[in-house]
């Protein structure tokens, strides 16, 4: 078949480009894919043929990377061969590059592809890739300078979902009324969500999106909120309401600095206290079950889930705990601020704000986040870094933290200064053996890898308990960076 | 003495962080010992805008903006009276468009505004997005204003309303005549987000002073330590030159989450 020959030739050429870039010490997350698609116009369609439905696409504003890492890891753990764009290169070229890099010539009986896909890219790949599972995590305002308004992004995804193959399982966050809107007619739709009345907040300070029904335009009413616009919603206009979740997370409680809960009767344990990660676990669980794993096959992994790159990684620098997290929009920043609030003895917060294309060139979103939440947290120093460090300093000034504000442009130099600064906490505790106050680093995308690499080199990653279950990202981060 | 700030449609017009302007004006007044009350004005409620010294309005998404357009019609007379009695109005982006005579959509439909400004807006093809630098007269010295624009509507001014600023970098009102925003007496409209007042503390204080005039205590606001604001302005001039020198974003850029 000419087509198959062409596909493998394109893949080989792409792989040469990949190796060349790697030898030259360059990042290789897009160009190899561009070359392969140029040489074989049906490249993605051939990928769709190869995986024949054992292909998962994950889209939405927040949680794509974490969810696809969980799906990839759980499949891997069970002996599946997995192709995935684990570094978050989620445009068409990034997906093609992941295939170039990872696809094995020899077919495996158990193999799957797991791609996180940029919202606007979904419609460009869905017909070629013909997924067997699609996950829609949520919709928040994000980098609007690129896509225009949220409504348009949601329409794009809805259009893509209307074109998934029959039999495709659509896993949609049903607690999010905006995501609910993209559910396609005549497909297998499963709405996942939280059955956790004790976590409902009567009011949300943070609802920015989806205040109106996506079908009839009537303002939505809520029995309570989990975060952002996610919650138990109902439309008094057309009667649509938040669907009963499947899969659902129940009995969510704080445990050992993380969260413990149940999914389908299985006990699950997360190493970080962000409620948003429970949604990612639900989505991943639904996806691997749809692909073919049994409950027993995820039982072990669910009991010790670790969040991956940039989703709260812990390090230690000169005995001092450092936490690194990615923030890229107001909702994400709000969730991280809640985590800071729940973490004892945080003395220094480093905020890295960049305005490169990958971060979004409009930095005004920091004014939509509720920085005021940390006013009484006792933070001693707010360190601002990045290409728009001063913009962040102004924001912190108006949030009226009783902290000293310092600006150091270079993110690494800033984190270094923040972590070497002896905190008052250590002095008052007297003993040098006691851990000093935690340094919390919140960064936008373009500084994440630099900071992480530096922390990996300079510090030690924190290993608390069983270390056999390392997240897949750290592995791939080393191989592709 | 109490300053009353009216936040118009905080739930409907909340795009691009313009609520920051309310926070900034509130705190800059409080830091000087002025008592401040912020009142919400929501669609359909009975709040009387005539009690406000400063009225702020942001921008919203299309659907939400047309809801506001309808509600605003009922408030027009009260708004006009408030302005006549010395209240200051600041409207950003979509709010600015609604203060004009009308907004003409791509299909030719005209959404009526309330005509507080002699201006009209026509939907455009090209989206005008990016950092803006503009020159703005503040009763005397010209002040450089820093903001961020993101709009496709093009606004044109008629006799009776002056441009508020002149763009040095960016598109401004319509991308062609070099004007940005509009001013008619105490009514101001602009496309600049950022939020507008974050990096322009002198503009913020100037607006505060104008609003306080009706209390008989205009100028003479005590200076605040705007250290980061000054640093941000200085840095942004260099940063924008740097960005202008950079090639435009290449297609291959991928962005994880
Ligand atoms: Zn409805």
Image (tube, coloured by chain):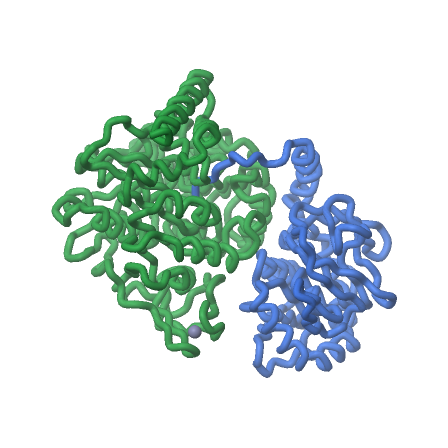
Chain colours: A green, B blue
Residue B146, percent from left and from top: 70, 48
Indicate the quadrant where residue B249 lies: top right
User: Relative to the observer, which residue lies in front, B140 or B167?
Assistant: B167
Please, which residue is most extreme toward the left here?
A: A296
- The residue located at (28%, 42%) in the rendering is A52
Residue B18 located left or right of residue A467: right
Q: Nearer the viewer, residue A371 or A354?
A: A354
Q: Is residue B194 left or right of residue B255?
A: right
B85 up-or-down from A73: above or below: below
Taking depth in this image into account, of A422 and B183 the one nearest to the observer is B183
Rendered residue at 64%/81% (across/down):
B48
Looking at the image, residue B24 sits to the left or right of residue A384; the answer is: right
Rendered-image quadrant of the C terminus of chain B: top left
- Percent position of residue A272, x then y: 30, 46
* Residue A367 can be seen, yes or no: yes
Asked where in the image residue A198 lies, by quadrant, the reply is: bottom left
The residue drawn where x is 60% and y is 42% is A390
Determine the residue located farthest toward the front in the rendered image. A1
B222 or B74, which lies in front? B74
Pinpoint residue B70: horizontal percent, then vertical percent: 63, 77
Quarter placement of the N terminus of chain B: bottom right
A428 vs B70: above or below: above
Residue at 20 percent across and 43 percent down: it is A304
Disc tally is 0
Residue A190 x/y as whole percent: 28, 60
* Residue A379 appears in view: no
Quadrant of the rendered image holding ligand 1:
bottom left
* Residue A85 sits in quarter: top left
């Amino acid at each position: 078949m000419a087509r198959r020959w062409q596909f493998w030739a394109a893949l080989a050429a792409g792989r040469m480009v990949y190796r060349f870039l790697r030898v030259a010490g360059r990042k290789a997350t897009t160009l190899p894919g561009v070359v392969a698609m140029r040489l074989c116009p049906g490249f993605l369609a051939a990928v769709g043929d190869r995986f024949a439905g054992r292909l998962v696409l994950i889209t939405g504003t927040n949680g794509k990377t974490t969810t696809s890492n969980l799906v990839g890891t759980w499949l891997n753990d069970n002996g599946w061969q997995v192709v995935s764009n684990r570094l978050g290169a989620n445009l068409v070229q990034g997906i093609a590059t992941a295939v170039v890099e990872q696809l094995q010539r020899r077919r495996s009986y158990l193999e799957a592809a797991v791609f996180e896909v940029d919202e606007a890219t979904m419609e460009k790949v869905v017909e070629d890739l013909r997924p067997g599972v699609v996950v829609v995590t949520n919709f928040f305002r994000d980098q609007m300078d690129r896509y225009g308004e949220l409504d348009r992004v949601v329409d794009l995804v809805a259009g893509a979902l209307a074109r998934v193959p029959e039999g495709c399982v659509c896993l949609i966050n049903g607690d999010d009324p905006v995501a609910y809107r993209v559910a396609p007619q005549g497909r297998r739709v499963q709405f996942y969500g939280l059955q956790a009345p004790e976590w409902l907040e009567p009011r949300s300070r943070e609802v920015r999106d989806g205040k109106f029904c996506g079908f009839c335009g009537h303002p939505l009413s809520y029995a309570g909120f989990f975060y952002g616009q996610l919650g138990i919603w109902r439309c008094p206009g057309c009667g649509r309401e938040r669907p009963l979740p499947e899969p659902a997370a129940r009995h969510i409680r704080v445990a050992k600095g993380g969260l413990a809960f149940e999914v389908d009767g299985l006990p699950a344990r997360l190493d970080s206290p962000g409620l948003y990660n429970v949604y990612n676990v639900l989505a991943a669980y639904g996806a691997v079950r749809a692909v073919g794993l049994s409950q027993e096959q995820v039982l072990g992994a669910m009991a010790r889930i670790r969040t991956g790159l940039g989703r709260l990684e812990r390090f230690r620098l000169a005995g001092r705990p450092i936490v690194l997290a990615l923030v890229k929009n107001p909702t994400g920043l709000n969730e991280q601020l809640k985590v800071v609030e729940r973490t004892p003895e945080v003395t220094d917060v480093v905020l890295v704000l960049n305005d490169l294309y990958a971060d979004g060139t409009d930095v005004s979103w920091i004014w939509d986040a509720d920085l005021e939440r940390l006013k009484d947290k006792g933070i001693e120093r707010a360190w601002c870094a990045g290409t728009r460090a001063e913009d962040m300093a102004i924001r912190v000034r108006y949030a009226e933290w009783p902290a000293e504000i310092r600006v150091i442009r270079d993110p690494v130099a800033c984190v270094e200064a923040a972590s070497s600064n002896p905190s008052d906490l250590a002095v008052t505790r007297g003993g040098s053996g006691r851990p000093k106050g935690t340094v919390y680093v919140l960064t936008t995308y373009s500084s994440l890898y630099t900071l992480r690499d530096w922390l990996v080199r300079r510090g030690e990653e924190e290993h608390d308990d069983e270390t056999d279950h390392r997240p897949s990202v750290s592995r791939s981060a080393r191989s592709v960076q | 003495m109490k300053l009353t700030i009216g936040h118009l449609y905080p739930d409907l017009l909340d795009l691009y962080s313009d609520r920051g302007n309310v926070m900034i004006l509130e705190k800059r007044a409080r830091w000087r010992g002025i008592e401040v009350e912020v009142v919400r004005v929501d669609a359909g409620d009975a709040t009387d805008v005539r009690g406000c010294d400063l009225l702020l309005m942001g921008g919203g998404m299309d659907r939400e903006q047309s809801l506001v357009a309808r509600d605003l019609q009922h408030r027009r007379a009260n708004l006009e009276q408030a302005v006549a009695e010395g209240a200051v109005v600041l409207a950003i982006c979509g709010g600015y468009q609604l203060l004009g005579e009308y907004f003409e959509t791509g299909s030719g439909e005209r959404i009526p505004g309330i005509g507080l400004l002699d201006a009209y807006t026509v939907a455009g093809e090209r989206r005008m997005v990016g950092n803006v630098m503009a020159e703005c007269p503040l009763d005397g010295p010209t002040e450089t204003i820093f903001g961020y624009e993101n709009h496709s509507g093009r606004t044109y001014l008629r006799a009776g309303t002056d441009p508020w600023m002149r763009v040095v970098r960016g598109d401004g009102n319509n991308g062609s005549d070099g004007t940005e925003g509009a001013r008619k007496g105490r009514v101001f409209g602009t496309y600049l987000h950022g939020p507008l007042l974050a990096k322009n503390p002198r503009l913020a204080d100037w607006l505060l002073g104008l609003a306080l005039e009706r209390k008989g205590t205009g100028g003479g606001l005590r200076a605040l330590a705007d250290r980061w604001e000054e640093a941000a302005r200085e840095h942004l001039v260099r940063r924008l030159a740097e960005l202008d020198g950079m090639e435009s974003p290449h297609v291959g850029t991928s962005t994880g989450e």
